[in-house]
Image: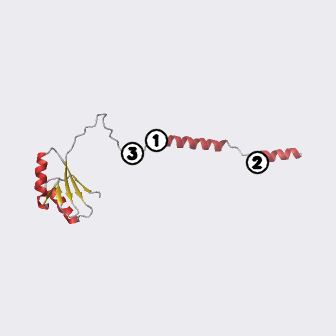
Amino acid sequence: MRNHSARTLNNEAEIDMTPMLDIVFIMLIFFIVTASFLKESGLPLNVPENSPPTTKDRVSLILQVSESNEVLFGARRIDIRAVGANLKRKMSELDNPSVVVRAHPGARTDTLMQVVDRVHDAGVHDFIVSPIKE
């Protein structure tokens, strides 16, 4: 009799794992299905066609503002008021030149801004301002 009561206690203590496994597998299937439908958003990428790069040698017109606030156009010194006229004349002679304004770190800011204003007055809106490296 004693053995019989010990068996009934063991039978009552067992837990049936089948429903829990069913739930786990159903959840796994649910997450796999929903994860495959997620669409990641990104930026559109326009890939250029495979063509050789075209390089044109552009001539650069260089205006320099020296440490003593003198304006140099090429190799010659010019007045700030003549920057626009000289730039227009040179741009009409050349085919789409680029304009570079180089300023010495010790140059006055108002002189540099006057040169930049004269470049704008000459009709150039796409130019580069860079420092002169010592």
Q: Amino acid at mark 1?
A: Phe
Residue situated furthest right in the rendering: 1
Amino acid, disc 2: Ala
Where is residue 27? Give x, y as percent.
Answer: 57, 44
Residue 115 % position (x, y): 17, 60
Q: Amino acid at mark 3?
A: Gly
Percent x, y of residue 113: 20, 62
Q: Which mark is residue 13?
A: 2
- The picture quadrant where one finds residue 55 is top left
**Residue at position x 34%, y 42% from top?**
45
**Relative to the observer, which residue lies in front, 37 or 87?**
87
**Whole-number angstrom distance, CA of label 2 to CA of label 3:** 55 Å
Q: Few, some or many C-alpha atoms within 10 Å of disc 2 (few <14, some 14-19, many ≥20)? A: few
**Foreground residue, 27 or 109?**
109
SS of the residue at dot 1? Answer: loop
Quick one: quadrant of the N terminus? Answer: top right
Dot 2: element: helix
- The answer to whether 23 appears left or right of 111 in the picture is right
Q: Which residue is mark 3?
A: 42
Report the disc number at residue 37.
1
Q: Quadrant of residue 40?
A: top left
Q: Residue at x 20, y 65 (%)?
A: 110
Q: Nearer the viewer, mark 2 or mark 3?
A: 3
Q: Which mark identifies residue 67?
A: none
Which badge, 3 or 1, is on the more N-terminal residue? 1
In this orientation, which residue lies closer to the viewer: 3 or 24?
A: 24
Instruction: Count residues near mark 3 (Cα–Cα under 10 Å), then give few for <14, some for 14-19, many for 20+.
Output: few
